[in-house]
Image: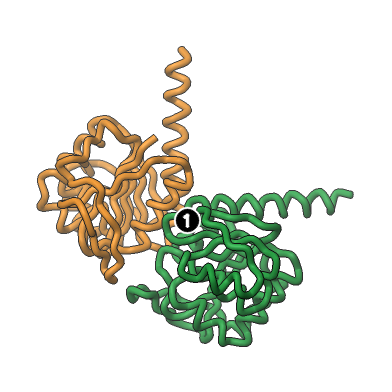
Chain colours: A green, B orange
C-alpha cells in the first residue's frame, strides 16, 4: 500500500513527521509531494525531502492522502495541482486525513460541502463558509475523511486513519474473494 | 503503562516527536523529563514541554525509557540525574530505546559494556571505548536495549521498542497468572 503526503514550506513539523514515520512503520510506502521536488522547510526550519512535485503525484497510485497543517495548506490552496490531487482522492472515495490547517486545502478544493470536520479552531468559520459542519473534537471521521485539530490530537488522528485504511483493505480483500 | 523520554535542548525533532506521539497512540502515558521543567527546544527550534525535571523522574514508575538524539545526549552526559535515571532502568532490566546520539548517554552511564548497539556512525568509536560492540544496522536489539542510527530508522526503532514492550507485558501477565 502507498500513502501520499502533500505539503509545502511552512508545514507544522509534528503533523508531517509523525504520519510519515508512522505509515512507514505500518509497512506503507510513503511519498511526499510539494510544489517542487527537493527540500521542504517546516515552520521551525526542519527539512524533509519531497520526492515528487505535486504535478507528478498520481492519486491513482495511493490508498491514503495526508494533509499536514501549518502554513502550507493556505499556500497550496492557490496551487492548481494540489487542488486537483485533493479532488481526485475525493472522487475515488479513498481515505483522506487532514489536520489543523490542513482542512483549509480541502475547503479550497470544494470537497467539504455537507461534510462534518474538525480543524484548528481559527479556521472553523472559513470551513463553514464552504458548506462544512464544524465540530470541536480530537478527531472526526465522516466517510472517507479523517480530520483533527492539531498536534495534541495526533494519536487519535493516526488511530482513525489506520482504522479507515485497514477497513478499506479488508473490504477490498472481501470484494476480491467474491 | 508509562514511558519516560529524557532529553534536553538541541534534541533531534523527529527522534523525540515520533516516539512521543507513537507511544501515546499505543495507549501509554508519556512523560518528558529534561534538566528543568518547561520548554525544551529542538535543534531546529521546535518546542516541547518537559512536564518533569530529571530529578523528579522516578524510573520505578515507567515501563520504557526513550533517549532521542541530537545534541541533547552529550549535554545530559554531564548531568548526574540523567545518568542515575539510565542506570536505574538498566538495573531493573526494563526496556531502553536510544537512537542516533542517544546511546552516548548510555555509554556515559557505564551500562554498555559487552552490549551490542548501533547509533549514529560518528559516535561508534566513542561507544566502543566504553566496551560496546558497534553494529551498522537500522535497529539492534540486545536484551532490554533497542538502538537505531537516526531518523530514517524510526519505523524499525518503534517496531522493535513496541515488540519488546508487548513481550514484557505478556511476560508479566504470564507471571501474574502463575
Viewer-nearest residue: A24 or A149: A149
Classify mark 1: residues with Cα within 10 Å, few (<14), some (14-19) or many (20+). Answer: many
Q: Which of the 4 image quadrants contains residue A33?
A: bottom right
Residue at image location 21% in from the left, 55% down from the top: B38
Relative to residue B49, is residue B144 depicted above or below? above
Q: Position of residue B177 (x, y in %)?
A: 47, 15
Residue at 46 percent of width and 41 percent of height? B27
**Residue B8 seen in the current view:** yes
Q: State the quadrant of the N terminus of chain A.
A: bottom right
| Picture residue at 32% right of the left edge, 47% below the top | B66
Say above or below: B78 vs B81: below
Q: Is residue A31 visible?
A: no
Q: Quadrant of residue A31?
A: bottom right
Q: Residue sitting at 63 percent across and 75 percent down?
A: A130
- Specify the farthest residue to the right: A178
Determine whether, in the image, residue A164 is placed left or right of residue A14. right
User: Which residue corresponds to mark 1?
Assistant: A154
Relative depth, front residue between B71 and B24:
B24
**Please, what secondary structure does the residue beneath circle 1 have?**
helix
Amino acid at each position: 500500500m502507498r500513502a501520499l503526503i502533500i505539503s509545502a514550506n511552512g508545514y507544522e513539523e509534528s503533523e508531517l513527521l509523525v504520519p510519515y514515520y508512522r505509515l512507514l512503520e505500518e509497512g506503507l510506502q510513503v511519498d511526499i509531494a510539494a510544489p517542487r521536488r527537493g527540500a521542504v522547510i517546516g515552520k521551525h526550519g526542519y527539512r524533509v525531502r519531497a520526492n515528487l512535485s505535486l504535478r507528478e503525484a498520481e492519486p491513482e497510485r495511493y490508498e491514503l492522502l495526508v494533509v499536514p497543517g501549518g502554513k502550507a495548506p493556505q499556500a497550496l490552496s492557490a496551487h492548481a495541482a494540489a487542488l486537483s490531487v485533493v479532488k481526485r482522492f475525493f472522487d475515488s472515495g479513498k481515505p483522506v486525513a487532514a489536520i489543523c490547517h490542513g482542512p483549509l486545502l480541502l475547503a479550497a478544493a470544494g470537497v467539504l460541502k455537507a461534510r462534518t470536520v474538525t480543524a484548528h479552531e481559527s479556521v472553523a468559520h472559513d470551513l463553514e463558509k464552504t458548506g462544512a459542519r464544524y465540530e470541536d473534537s480530537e478527531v472526526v471521521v465522516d466517510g472517507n475523511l479523517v480530520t483533527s485539530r492539531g498536534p495534541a490530537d495526533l494519536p487519535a488522528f493516526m488511530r482513525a486513519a489506520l482504522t479507515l485504511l485497514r477497513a478499506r483493505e479488508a473490504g477490498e480483500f472481501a470484494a476480491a474473494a467474491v
